[in-house]
Image (spheres, rainbow, N blue to C red):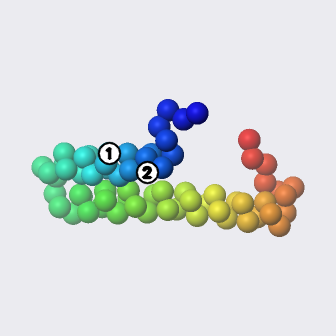
Amino acid sequence: MYLIPPESLSRLLVVMAVTVVEMMNFLDPLIITFIQVALVIGPLSLLGVVLLLRKIEKNHPERIRWK
């Protein structure tokens, strides 16, 4: 049983990110653009690392230990 259903968790994260960006209107537009790019690239790179580790684990299970 989840406190927040998984399908609505992604929507919640998007709403939180948009709210934070809207609250930063006093910042320079270049800084806001950097933060928006980091909000997209960060989770994608983490997903890429997890997928890479799963692929390595599939081929060489002795090299990766999930805890």
Amino acid on which disc 2 is placed: Ser
Percent of width and height locating residue 17? 32, 50
Secondary structure state at the residue bearing disc 1: helix
Percent of width and height locating residue 33? 26, 63
Left or right of 48: which side holds 29? left
Examine the image and state in which quarter residue 41 appears: bottom left
Percent of width and height locating residue 29? 17, 61
9 vs 39: above or below: above
Q: Quadrant of the C terminus?
A: top right
Look at discs 2 and 1 and give the one toward the viewer.
Answer: 2
Amino acid on which disc 1 is placed: Met
Q: Quadrant of the N terminus?
A: top right
Read off the residue under disc 2. Answer: 10
Tell me which residue sits at (40%, 61%) in the image.
40
Spatial CA distance of label 2 from label 1 is 10 Å
Residue that protrudes farthest toward the right in the picture: 62
Tell me which residue sits at (65%, 62%) in the image.
51
Tell me which residue sits at (38%, 56%) in the image.
39
61 vs 24: above or below: below
Read off the residue under disc 1. Answer: 16
Secondary structure state at the residue bearing disc 2: helix
Tell me which residue sits at (43%, 51%) in the image.
10
- Please tell me how crowded label 2 is: few (under 14), some (14-19), or many (20+) other residues with Cα within 10 Å: few
Q: Choose the circle earlier in sequence order: 2 or 1.
A: 2
